[in-house]
Amino acid sequence: MKAVARILLLFCLVGSLMAADNSGRYERLGGKIMCSCSCGQMLLQCNHVGCPNSATMIRQLHEQVAATSATNDDDAVLNFFRREWGVTSVVEPNRRGFELLAWILPFAGLGLGIFCLVLVVHKWHAAPAAARSPEKMDPRLEALRARARRETEL
Amino acid sequence: MPLLGDFCLLFALALAAYSFVVGILAFIRKDEVGYRLGETARRAGIASFFAVTGAAIILVWAALTNDFSIAYIQEHSNRALPTPYKIAVLWSGQEGSLLFWSWLLATYAFVLRVRHKVDMRLVATTSMVLAGIQVFFLLLTNFVANPFGMMSTVAADGNGLNPLLQYPEMVIHPPMLYLGYVGFSLPFAFALAALMMRYPGEKWIHITRRWTMVTWLFLTCGIALGAHWAYAVLGWGGYWGWDPVENASLLPWLSGTAFLHSVMMQEKRGMMKVWNVWLIFVTFMLSILGTLLTRSGLVQSVHAFAQSSIGAWFYAFLAVIALVCVAAFVKNRKHLQSENKLESLVSRESSFLFNNLVLLAACFAVLSGTLFPILSEWVRGYRITVGAPFFNKVMLPIGLFLIFLTAVGPLLAWRNTSLGSLKKNFAIPAILSVLVGIGLIPLGVKPWNDLAYFYAWLTFVLGALVITTIGSEFIRGGRVLKDKLNTNIVGGMYHLTRRNMRRYGGYIVHFGVILACIGIAGQAFNQSKEQEMAQGDKLQIGRYTLVGQEYTEDDNANYQSNAALLDVYKDGKYITRLSPEHRQFKASMQGTTIVADYSTLKEDLYVIYEGLNPDTGHPIIKAFINPLVNWLWIGVLTVLLGTGLALVPNAAQLKSPVTVKAAAGVVEATGGGASMRPAGARK
């Protein structure tokens, strides 16, 4: 089990590191920007014929990806679009300031849930054990009960 | 006719109000007079169903007969609209869909009130709660969004149905979703009634189990149909865009799924009573929130066809529900004390706890992401957009953890599981899933390529883990029954399932969920290409070559269309001809895409006609290769099958006379071939 866990952990680390690879950066960033023509589609998915904005936005995306290729600064590209086309053009919240809260909230919720769960379990364990009935003390009946449980689970 | 419809609605409101008020009186009195009052309230509730049904039939009839004196019909229908879509007019706009809500609620309540003998006292109080909900919706349909509003002048033709809704699945997608949303009213009403009455035992849970499963089934079906419709009609190559209204349907689904799991803890061990009551309260409130999001325009959505300023009414209703729930809970919370405690963290109970935690974390993540633009507007003065990239990043790790729990949960026993038995049960599935992971790498699923590839790879590995654990559960149980019943392993597994339909139906649901996840994971390998194509031009994508053969135009009473005829070759061999289409609807002057899809179990070749290039006059074709997407739909069908099986009652136990000699530790059976002896005593 430990070996499996280690292999999985290794893949997690490798996966996270490789995610920083520059390949497909244009596609990835294009998937975070919304076309501003009110079609409600992502920039690279906009199939609105004669769209007044998507051609310009796609050209700008190409330029920005090329301009930041040395630093791979995705935030700079997204911020450019926020400035040029408004904050709603980027569909992923910023990772700074108030918008960081959007990223924190889901995991804070999970963390709070785990904390509450641990508290409840701790409370259950800390509570004095209920007096066991004589019936429960009988090992033969306990064995039969365990067996019945096993077999009725089928 | 419109006047008759109006009358039906008003009459239904009066009857529902009577049922509600007199139901409260009956609940307070608790004597013979109270019982009789309760009976009149029940009958009034039944009558209100017929009145709402009358109103719904009149509206559909008006659509079928092109009665454009009714504003709603003029707005949402036209003469050339095909008949099935005229029926769909009932739920295609604000006023009609609220009437449809009322009718579905009245139908559910009607079934309950007719079957009141299942538990007359509990059903009487439940019926009172349902009548309260009915009053709210009938108030809306009577005074806020009346579907029978009249036009001052009668138009020759109507504006027509939204073209996006003119698709066969759209005729059944909204009713399925509504059946899901409205259906949660029933377990909610039962839970609230049982709490208010301090009803002893878990009977309300036994009664509502099937209701909840049926509701969950409808909601699942509705969500899947919506996803399939988006895939087939919207023409962007995907099926789930994390649109706020899509999210709204996912919220009660997630909390309802948590409820379906945690309720087993209460049934089997008398635990988590407070949790279950609140879970169903929250699920119902999320259903109402879903309707609020769809109707109010609170969030920007592609489902804008149903928006209006009705939100304030829903806010008020939500506040009233929350207040009633809190008051009932505070007053009766002592009734909800747990009968047992968690004995071990390695047990079925703890797996349900974690499962609930993760499902609710997913629910919270979707809710916070959906509502964050509103929060941003309040705090910063501008509304940011939270879209698919955010949800994918947040939900994927949560989803993968949930798949892991799905694999581990069935291997744990109630109360306590020894590490030894866990190792024994877990070893083979774990080894097989690791082998699957290794085997995928030469096939091109290299987790180090990209984070999307990594998530896809992990989904396949965990999916294999779940499938092998489910398989091992069936095989292990099948083997035991094979010996007992003198049959083969398949017969053993059949009898195993028939003996505990709920449990093994549940496993089939889990299997379906994994198939769906495999379909979703295929997105990591999507490809797309767009090209302007004159006759004879070729578009190469993956192993497919598309050759433009012909471009046609058509015109009928409802729409004009442009279509392309494309021959498809795979590795140079002709396989099919596809015809993507673009339709322009005359009444609404709106366009829509008709996707051409060559679908196999391995991948879909998905082609759309984007329109004509105004400069060259040539069509623009966009093609996608969407791997594994069919498994998503197969997975959904498997989920529906599993849920259906779980709803079937268990087969009667074997009719073999059994003699129990507990003291001797021997259980003997004769006639049926079943024989259980202690270890070592087996002959």
Image (cartoon, grey):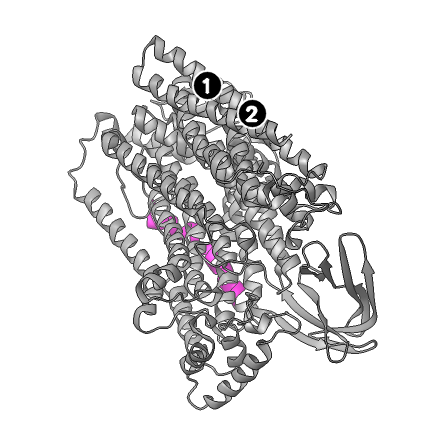
Front disc: 2 or 1: 2
Q: Crowding near pointer 1: few (<14 within 10 Å), some, many (20+)?
A: many
Query: Does B528 appear above or below B416?
Result: below
Q: Which structural element holds mark 2?
A: helix
The chain containing the residue under callout 1 comes to B
Q: Which residue is mark 1?
A: B42
Out of B494 and B522, give the one closest to the viewer. Answer: B522
Taking depth in this image into account, of B130 and B63 the one nearest to the observer is B63
Amino acid at pointer 1: Arg
Main SS of the magenta segment? helix
In the picture provided, is B116 more to the left or to the right than B349? right
Among the 4 quarters of the image, the one containing residue A95: bottom left
Q: Residue at x 51, y 51 (%)?
A: B307
Residue B342 versus residue A76 in the image, above or below: above
Q: CA distance from mark 2 to mark 1?
A: 15 Å
Amino acid type at circle 2 is: Ala
Measured as percent of width and height from the top left, residue B183 is found at 49, 36
Tell me which label, 2 or 1, sits earlier in the chain. Answer: 1
Left or right: where B453 falls relative to B225: left
| Badge 2 vs badge 1, beta-carbon distance below 8 Å | no
Q: Is residue A104 visible?
A: yes
**What residue range appears in magenta?**
B417-437
Residue wearing tag 2: B51
Residue B344 at what x, y percent from top left? 28, 45
